[in-house]
Image (cartoon, rainbow, N blue to C red):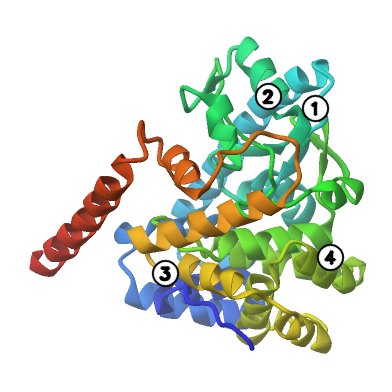
Amino acid sequence: MSERLGNLPSGEQLLVLHAALDERSAALAAWQRWRDSVDFDAVDHGSTRLLPLVYRNLGADSLDAEVAGRLKGLYRRSWSHNQLIFRRAAEAIDLLEAAGIETLVTKGASLALLSYGDVGVRPMDDVDVLVPIERTRDAIAALSAGGWSPEHDDPPAWTQVHHSLGFAGPDSGNVDLHWFSLWQPARDDELWRASVALELGGAATRAPCATDQLLLACVHGTPWSPLPPFRWIADAVTVIRAGGADLDWDRVVAEAERRRLTVATGAALAYLGEEFGAAAPEDVVARLQAAPASRHERAAFRAACRPDSPLRTLRMAWDRYRRLRDLDTGAPRPAGFVRFAQAFWGLESAWQLPLHAAGALSRRRHGRGAARSAP
């Protein structure tokens, strides 16, 4: 049984993606259609994050002077900002290294350096740094001692139910410390074994190999988000095109099966082939779609692709709880789903759960009513 993505870019957002990723003539045609239909001063944030890549793909000579200047400005701002956060992240990586903790940089920073080959085309807000799960608390202690401030007051409790924790540096800069590479917890041993060397802001670290970058991009990007999440498409297409023959498609299938993520991976790769011609070998999507997948995995995937709601969050929390329950990490976990949900939402008592759910549902309904009545 195959599943299809339910969280896709709008028609206008799709034009930006094609302008950023297609060959020149097709990219120019998509760009012109987008310019004819969108007010440049009212571009959604998700599309804005792709404009530096559009600038590199089309070149300034393909754009009118005003737009070329604005896109160049976005590109230069992205390049400068990324250089700054890379240097700040390097300081955090050095703190972890001094504590004897290995690091692996995932997502935007490693993609910009290894797949895009251009720091300016991939805007980002922070650097994602993975540490071995058994060193999670040591990593939190090392960063805190070095002047980095965690986003939450009780990091040890947070680690029991989440997969990452944001830290703000003493001199700007933001790092998202991960102990799982993905929201869906699984052992990352294979990710570490196949990782490649990376230098980030002068610090020596590691990055996922191209094959694992592709899997992470597909799975991480497909859930719904208030910030349009379609940048995963540009990431995945770029990895496929840059990786070429070096991509190990058998590994993609094997890792998706091991992580119980064949549904999300198969749906993402099918879409990339259909819409952007970034096709996996013919049998790969078929193998992913034919792989056994539990009803829990399918239900969680469908929920993740829908807009936020109490039921969606509950479904995803239940999936995460089941995965953690089945995973032997040696780390303490809340006993039972009620306790897990209490910790997940940061509630003082389990008795608050019904009120929390009712409040979330009321806020959602109120938001819908306000949207319907807005001019």
Residue situated in front as seen by the camera: 52 or 244: 244
Distance CA(mark 2)–CA(mark 4):
35 Å
Mark positioned earlier in the residue sequence (3 or 2):
2
Distance CA(mark 1)–CA(mark 4):
24 Å
**Residue drawn at the location 81% of the way across and 50% of the way down:** 208
Q: Position of residue 203 (x, y in %)?
A: 80, 27
Tell me if label 1 and label 2 are in contact, CB under 8 Å.
no
Mark positioned earlier in the residue sequence (2 or 4):
2
Mark positioned earlier in the residue sequence (1 or 2):
2
Q: Position of residue 360 (x, y in %)?
A: 26, 52
**Can you say whether 149 is above or below 276 in the image?**
above
Residue situated in front as seen by the camera: 60 or 362: 362
Task: Give the foreground label among 2 and 4.
Answer: 2
Secondary-structure class at tag 1? strand
Whether residue 10 is visible here, answered yes or no, is yes
Q: Amino acid at mark 3?
A: Arg
Q: Report which residue position mark 4 lands on.
A: 243
Q: Report which residue position mark 3 lands on.
A: 306
The disc placed on residue 203 is 1
Residue situated in front as seen by the camera: 58 or 284: 284
Task: Give the foreground label among 3 and 2.
Answer: 2
Q: Report which residue position mark 2 lands on.
A: 137
Secondary-structure class at tag 2? helix
Indicate left or right for 209 with 53 as reference. right
